[in-house]
Image (cartoon, rainbow, N blue to C red):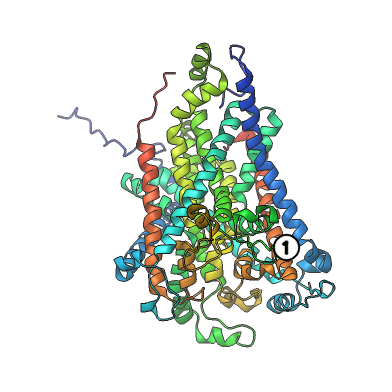
Amino acid sequence: MSTHVQVPPPPPAQPLGIPGSESSWSRGDRLGVAAAWGAGILLCLVAAAIVLYMLSRGLQYLSLEMLVSHPLPSLDQSQSGGFFDPIEGTLILTVLGTAIAVPLGVGIAVWLSEYARPAWLARAVESGVEIVAGTPSIVLAIFGLLVFQQSVFGFLSFTADGNAVFGRSFFTAGAMMSLIALPLIVGSTREALQAIPAHVREASYALGKDRISTIRRVLLPASRRGIGTGITLGMGRIVGDTAIVVVLLGASLQIEPENGTPIWGLLKGTGSTLTTYVYNNSPAGEGGAPQKAYAAAFVLLLIVIALNFAVDLIARGKEPQWTR
Amino acid sequence: MSTSGSPSAAQPRNRTDQRAEVLLGALACAVLVLIAFMIVFVFVKAWPSFADNGLAWFGAGGNVDEQMQNIFNSPADPSDYVYTMHAWPLLYATALITGISVLLATAISLLSAIFIVEFAPVFMQRLLRPVIRLLAAVPSVVYGLIGILVLVPFFGNHVISDGEKESVRYVIQLDGTSVLVGVLVLTVMITPIMVAITTDALRSVPRTWTEGAAALGVNRFRALRTVGIRAARPAIVAAGVLATARALGEAIMLSMVSGSVGFAPNPLDGVTFLFEPARTLAATVVDNSEGLSVKPFGQTIYAFAAILLISSAFLSFAGWVARSSMRKYTLQAR
């Protein structure tokens, strides 16, 4: 019995430090650890507060009717309709923005990762993408207005009598939206491409394939998940952006297509999205209908959370296993 | 990382391939062309406002809102356009709100990154991942809505005392839309970006480095603080740059929450100064986007945008310089 040595319980999750060195904790360090705990808990509390608050307000004010009825110009809240058009607007803008951003973003990522010659140009493009990512969306928005009001782009939006181009339409807003999604798509596509080991490319070359067919048949299919993640993140940014919509979509209450062919006319027309609907109905806008703003914000939050969930689903998918 | 940058000898080349390379390269250059266009367009448009005021544009003097009103109402004759603008209150508000929130966010994100990497129990680690993702994903207009409908009335009715309202009554009206609420909400918005990047960087610090510190008898917190954080400095700078860019460009939330008065909060007012409203450059642009078609007014607004554009470009450049100067003894920031 006396030979039995008491084994200390294994330390949980291998903490750093020599056993018994805990006495070296100074008061400042203890304070630091407490502050670290505090910061972690604070983040959780803030997130919980936002989600619970929006959930309660959303359930309180949201009704099915709001989702399917058109917004109407009325000061009386019971007469001002729902937000079917803003939901539609968000959808159109997201699809349009993504449709423009994906080929551009994937192309740039492929060039950066597979060609990147000359090197100085690649460096410049790389920092260019970084600058686009860092440019505030409000600056992109009014830059877009400046560009699309040139008469060359008159076919993309409404043109007034005096040949003044309005510059505001789903097309113009979608084009600028694609720029805020672009850096995310470039980033994750590039990351996925670089994760593919070189011998996979070499195997393809050994079979007599040239670079571009290797990219199309081997590399892009293998980096599908990275591209998917980038697209979903980009959609999240587009759905949540307000500044571009305020400036470039004309902020008409209902979707107002231009005359002409159905789809083209719709895209040339003006409208609003959930974000501007929330903005205009909050005390900051002219609407002053906080209930509607809460309901629309709740729907917006649900969409964003769903997109986040989609990112997780994509990331959880089966990864191609390359033997090293 | 990429082993494919240079062509290998075995690699077949042909016409299609060369065409594809040129095409993709042109696509990539389109980004550069776009940026060049953006800078040129915005500056050309903004030039009259800068040229008319000279350096006084950046100075203080007069009431910004009155000046903007005068510009908006300038006579139709181009030779009579009014351009007088002293944008100091807006520049100051931008620097103030951005600066305080980035400082706060840096402190919170460093602490919570240390917490996540070293001290958090497993369930907290699992919880914090989606929490941070969620906080980063909430659209700014939703933050703004919560700010204007919950925080602003709360601060206006309960936190700001009548005495404080009285003390600045002749200068500005305190109703809750304030620098403080703006800073608080903005901090919540930018912290998650910084936490995510800092956590990743701390995780990729080789375990042996912190263990080495621990072997010298240092406790866990100090090992992380002195070795981990130091090794992760480039990533922390990168995170700070991203967060600052986001804060600088945040327009919608701040225009909702921090008051739409072009007012320069006076630090001499003591704590009350945090309760005073202020309007940042980006918020000013959003608030006045309706008036862009009035020529001199539009040119003034584009001048604000030009300042934003320059600051964000300068920011990415400064971040790059800081990172490359730290690169020698630290982890590579990606």
Which residue is nearer to you in this view: B212 or B73?
Answer: B73
Label 1: which residue?
B303
Residue at far front of view: A260
Query: Which percent across, then down, holds residue A283?
Result: 48, 75
Going 77% across and 57% down the picture, which residue do you hit?
Answer: B44
| Chain assignment, label 1 | B
Going 57% across and 50% down the picture, which residue do you hit?
Answer: A175
Query: Which percent across, then down, holds residue A136?
Result: 60, 55
Which residue is nearer to you in this view: A124 or A244?
Answer: A244
Q: Which quadrant: the N terminus of chain B?
A: top right
Going 74% across and 68% down the picture, which residue do you hit?
Answer: B295
Residue at far right of view: B79
Q: How many marks?
A: 1
Query: Which percent across, then down, holds residue B136?
Result: 46, 53
The three-letter amino acid code for the residue at tag 1 is: Ala
Q: Quarter of the image holding residue A165? A: bottom right
